[in-house]
Amino acid sequence: MPGDAGRTLRQRHDVLLLDLDGTVYAGPHAIPGARDALVVDGGPRLFYVTNNASRSPASVAAHLNELGFPATESEVVTSSQSAARLLAEQLPAGAAVLVVGTEALADEVRAVGLHPVRRFEDSPVAVVQGHSPDTGWPILAEATLAIRAGAYWVASNVDTTLPTERGLCLGNGAMVAALRVATEREPVVAGKPAAPLMEDSVRRSGAHAPLMVGDRIDTDIAGANAVGMASLLVLTGVSTPADLLRAPVEHRPTYLAASLAALDADAGTLVFAPDQRVRVRRESGDIVVRVDEGVDALAVLRSVLVEAWRDPEFAAVRGEDPVSAAVADQLA
């Protein structure tokens, strides 16, 4: 990106829009190094943007404070809030909305003047669906009846997985998929990669030059691209180098780094560009790499991605010599 060289990411942006799960924390624990990277004097303001609709903004802020991150309720933007806004724009005041999710999601429905219910017999005109670890067949059955009867359906997000301290577990998107199959309908999506949550984040933060920071190319990065926003992918959560190699255009970040520590790096070193220490060529359907000794694996990846994204029809990435092969193996 022109003008990146010599300026850090902090210096380029007035607001950091931070994903939570997999970027700032994993379950009850902070991502290693995240607190030191974010809790600094000066620099851009921090807003926390999450697809997870299971907790209230106040609860999320309290959890962040417990982990040592500065956060207020007003600095947390959730997909449940965006979902409630979408409902309020379509429904009359007081309309019944069947809630598939936690009471935190129901509270957001109440906050926009709508009436949350849990049964089809309460005549809901809409269904809103967000993540809850307690979601089961009974509430999905109520939602199925309502959607098949014509209810307006909003999903907070469609993440198929959710990062936890134990690993990846099923996310709200897996439950949305069950209703999609049962109803043959598609929901309106509020959270990343759809635009509503990103638009709400920019509006509420007042950002002029925001940077979306996240760990998933299919949500965080795609969401930023949907609204023309710069993005940083950190490899602390879901997406891997292998995912990037064949990423479609809408899933490609502006910057790539191992962790949030890169916020203090020269922004020009984090973009995707050829590196003279990395030679990349095509051979028999493969991308072949020759790397100078001591080159960082992410510098290699950025160079390889320039070639991979130019023409994604390749079989594999391999090294030309033992040193290069060892680095290329990290990209598989």
Image (cartoon, rainbow, N blue to C red):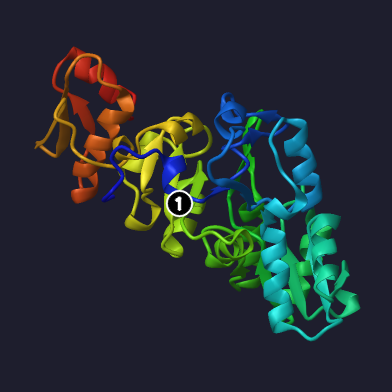
Task: Residue at 22% x, 39% y: name it.
Answer: 315
Q: Position of residue 207 (x, y in %)?
A: 54, 59
Q: Is residue 135 in view from this perspective? A: no
Say whether residue 263 is left or right of residue 205. Answer: left
Which residue is found at the position 51% from the left and 51% from the top?
Answer: 14
Give the left or right position of residue 18, taking residue 139 as reference.
left
State the residue lying farthest toward the right: 122
Q: In the rendered image, which quarter is residue 88 located in?
A: bottom right
Of residues 56 and 177, the one drawn nearer to the viewer in this rendering: 56
Q: Residue furthest bottom?
A: 92
Q: Residue 241: horizontal and vertical position, in percent?
A: 37, 35
| Element marked by disc 1 | helix
For the C terminus, the quadrant is top left
**Residue type (three-letter) at the residue carrying disc 1:** Ile
Residue 231: x, y in percent?
43, 49
| 33 left or right of 241 in image | right
Query: Count the marks: how many?
Result: 1
> What's the residue at 72%, 75% (across, down)?
87
Residue 308 percent location from the top left of the image:
22, 43
Q: Is 44 located above or below residue 150 in the figure?
A: above
The quadrant where residue 138 appears: bottom right
Q: Is residue 290 visible?
A: yes
In the image, taking residue 57 as reference, residue 32 lies left or right, namely: left
Which class describes the residues within 10 Å of circle 1: few (<14), some (14-19), or many (20+)?
Answer: many
Q: Which residue is mark 1?
A: 221
Establish if 78 lies above or below 199. above
